[in-house]
Image (cartoon, helix red, strand yellow):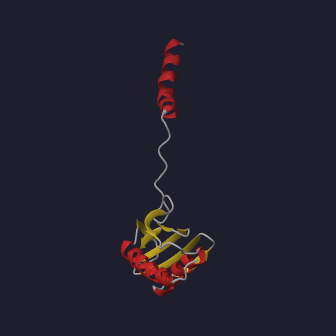
Amino acid sequence: MHKLTLAAALLLLPAAAALAQPPPPPPPPPSDAPTSGPERAGALLLPAGMSREGVKNAIVSALAGRGWQVVSSDRSSVHAHLLHRKKDCNLVFQFDVSRIDILSDSYVVDSTGVRTGRIIPNDWIENLEKDIREYASHMPRR
């Protein structure tokens, strides 16, 4: 009987060891899955005396001039999108009367439209910042 108990214990040992192992880590997310949301991509200080409406108008005008689509806007933010040259770019402009913070949730896409990696479209953002400054300089002051 003692040998039978020992044999059964030896047979169950690998199964018990497998149960004691921690579960394997989850598979990585697909390459087109967002990783962590928008990333800080830039900031602009604005001239004194700007109104919220003036800041918003400067942002929207700069986006329109560069072919971006305004997806949504409210009293303190503008959300924009551009799909161009295998880049799927989403920018958020969070603003008040003295500052604009720019956040990016943007990706490189392959020929089938699948996101293959995160990017920050720095050149495009620099162009938008330059245009926003120009439009802001022509906006009426409070």
Q: Residue at x 38, y 75 (%)?
A: 126
Nearest the eye: 37 or 19 = 37
Q: Residue at x 49, y 85 (%)?
A: 138
**Residue 110 visible somewhere in the drawing:** no
Q: Looking at the image, is 16 positioned above or below residue 52?
A: above
Q: Position of residue 120 (x, y in %)?
A: 40, 68
Q: Quadrant of the C terminus?
A: bottom right
Q: Residue furthest top?
A: 2
Q: Residue furthest left?
A: 123
Say how many tags the image has: 0
Nearest the eye: 119 or 32 = 119
Nearest the eye: 76 or 63 = 76
Q: Quadrant of the N terminus?
A: top right
Q: Position of residue 101 (x, y in %)?
A: 49, 66
**Residue 19 visible somewhere in the drawing:** yes
Q: Position of residue 118 (x, y in %)?
A: 42, 65
Nearest the eye: 51 or 127 = 51
Q: Looking at the image, is 9 positioned above or below residue 15?
A: above
Q: Position of residue 61 (x, y in %)?
A: 52, 84
Q: Looking at the image, is 67 positioned above or below residue 38?
A: below
Q: Looking at the image, is 54 positioned above or below residue 35?
A: below
